[in-house]
Amino acid sequence: MNQFTFYNPVKLVFGKESLEQLNDMVKAYSNGNKVLLTYGGGSIKKTGLYDEVMEKLSDFEVFELAGIEPNPRVETVRKGVEIVKAHDIDFIVAVGGGSVIDGTKLIAAASKYDGDAWDIVTRKAQVNDAVPFGTVLTLSATGSEMNSGSVITNWETNEKLGWGSPLVFPKFSLLNPEVLYTLPEHQTVNGIIDSMSHLLEQYFNEADNTEVQDQMISGVLKTVMKTGPIAVKDPKNYEARETLMLSSTVALNGFLRLGYVGDWATHNLEHAVSAVYDIAHGAGLAILFPEWMRYVSKQSPARFVKFAEDVFNVEASLSDEDKINYAIDELQNFWTSLGAKQKLSDYGVNAEDLEAFADKTLIYGPFGNFYKLQREDILAIYKAAL
Amino acid sequence: MNQFTFYNPVKLVFGKESLEQLNDMVKAYSNGNKVLLTYGGGSIKKTGLYDEVMEKLSDFEVFELAGIEPNPRVETVRKGVEIVKAHDIDFIVAVGGGSVIDGTKLIAAASKYDGDAWDIVTRKAQVNDAVPFGTVLTLSATGSEMNSGSVITNWETNEKLGWGSPLVFPKFSLLNPEVLYTLPEHQTVNGIIDSMSHLLEQYFNEADNTEVQDQMISGVLKTVMKTGPIAVKDPKNYEARETLMLSSTVALNGFLRLGYVGDWATHNLEHAVSAVYDIAHGAGLAILFPEWMRYVSKQSPARFVKFAEDVFNVEASLSDEDKINYAIDELQNFWTSLGAKQKLSDYGVNAEDLEAFADKTLIYGPFGNFYKLQREDILAIYKAAL
């Protein structure tokens, strides 16, 4: 492994009664009594969670920013910053999934900056301070509740960029698996694919001697594959929701990524597609990851053989090639069994789109830390996925 | 799993060059320029680490407390507290293994308390503040470098007690696997057994639905069993040292113990023996853990069958009893292959001692969170281990 620094100060509160701690937690981390509540499209009002949260926050003066969208936009963040600055807000409570939390991270940092929020995303401005915030998670997928990263979209410049700072770790995150009971099935499935993809991006890394991490990642992957179908079939199965919720937090809180970065090429391939077509992130990954694996395993097979052994318990008597093919097919079949599609054309993507996708992925040059993709590699993967 | 709160703000710096960050780290976390350096019996002077540390601390006024003993004593801690109070020390740097770090944790807390340090260990006094401290790890075993627990011995009252507080997490811990190259073989072996025992204590827990954690623990256990013999045979094998060092930190930093406490009966059984006989903690655990497993698996077999499947890949065709016996024998044979003894009598323990050991373990009543041991259980295990 490479030299690394691990640091993650988020207080993770997990269980059916976690929301009970909201009042105490905000008091512990806030220097005043003005709270901004951020959330998304309003599903928390239908489920009753909004009322519960407001009741727990009754000791505070609560301001609201509703409507943080999936793929949170910098325009919405700017509205949040305005509220924080106008009212001298002391603390932010984000109630939602990864998008609401990602947007809130930028509100927190930009509220302590004099210029425009987008400067922080583009690294024109450094983060030197942030308004403290905590989260109440309603959708399990991105891991944003326990990390310091954020992805923000700017429709003026047509960019979707990631940024991060140790100053935007949530102070706390409250996770109650029961809030997942009411998720639509496709969101449960996409959450499973998304968290598995985070584990895969990390498993295929640029370091050597990562056996501890490989085994932990494989263990979580196997658990998600065993548990996912239970939650899809029986959405109110507490144990399954509990296992999946914890898995997706663990999948991207940095603890399984000790001493390396991970590949992350497939995420870039996917973003280029979903920036144009209306494909959910998880659905796009389910199509692209197997093709990335088929292509890259031909160039650099050893790691894929180990993957087949670690995660799929392949028969030792098989050839390396058969082991790899078996593992990739099993992975894809698993996602298909949950309802994921296998081809980009199922979403209306055409062969003519592929060059434009490749252009978009290459804005910052060839990418992928395990295997660097050049233009011809990218096009080959897209073609196979079409 | 049970409801839980996970919080671990330690900054873990891992790799060959980690010591390079000492100066910056102390500056980041200290409010002044007076540092107390704590260490053990002086092996760091022989290895040259002392000189390196002093050089990195040349911007600071450094005071010293040498001689923190294995099983750190409250008398020594009191000396440290005196130095901190007399000189208004701003920061403590602990250079050593678990004992030095455990002692330092109590110095840090007791220096902000008006009464005697032992009050904190016995919970007579609450920890409300602590002098910030960081660590440079020289021996990989206890995991103290990334948790907030500490075990202190008081020879006046003949007690060895654990305590902890979120205020005594190290601010940082610097881990360089190369410092382990010069360890005597028995310390390497005991470190392996100690960290495996931490994993086992957690695997045998009182909660249900802990598949994510089970798989992560099993993964780390299997990795340690694969890697341990390499480090014993080839002490300067960097990759093996790296893997074991990371494993033992991970084994007890709380991250594999999400939603449960773990059993911890065997640790209590062992402390009673090593309080009287000169047996290293790891050596005692290697004898007692298999006998605890043989005894408790007869009372509560299901978890042991799962253990055999998760860690030892036992053949599915075996009976539950055979699976359990196979796994326990394999575990014990592994430790024996590293040089561990199998019987307490190998260390001079007599049958007449066993009642006194049992008395000692029962000071706070029956114990063990996975399976509560009563007096007759305890004696049966000790007899089998004799």
Image: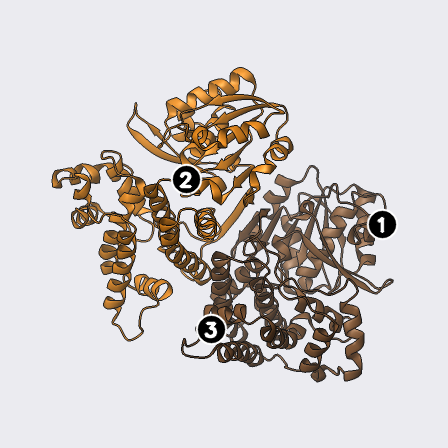
Chain colours: A orange, B brown
Kind of residue indicated by mark 1: Asp
- How far separated are the C-alphas under marks 1 and 2? 54 Å
Residue shown at 39% from the left, 48% from the top: A195
Q: Mark 1 falls within which chain?
A: B
Kind of residue indicated by mark 2: Thr
Residue A234 rendering spot, x and y as whole percentages? 39, 50
Q: Image quadrant for the N terminus of chain B?
A: bottom right
Q: State the residue lying farthest toward the top.
A: A86
Residue B311 rendering spot, x and y as whole percentages? 48, 70
Mark 1 lies on a secondary structure that is loop
Between disc 3 and disc 1, the foreground one is 3
* Disc assigned to residue A182: 2
**Taking A370 as reference, is B300 above or below it?**
below
- How far separated are the C-alphas under marks 2 and 3? 39 Å
**Taking B227 as reference, is A357 above or below it?**
above
Residue A211 rendering spot, x and y as whole percentages? 44, 63
Asked if both marks, 3 and 1, belong to the same chain, the answer given is: yes
Question: In this image, B17 relative to B123: left or right?
Answer: left
Q: Nearer the viewer, residue A238 or B162?
A: A238
Q: Mark 3 falls within which chain?
A: B
Asked if both marks, 2 and 3, belong to the same chain, the answer given is: no
Q: Circle 1 is placed at which residue position? A: B116
* Disc assigned to residue B312: 3
Mark 3 lies on a secondary structure that is helix
Circle 1/circle 2 CB separation < 8 Å: no
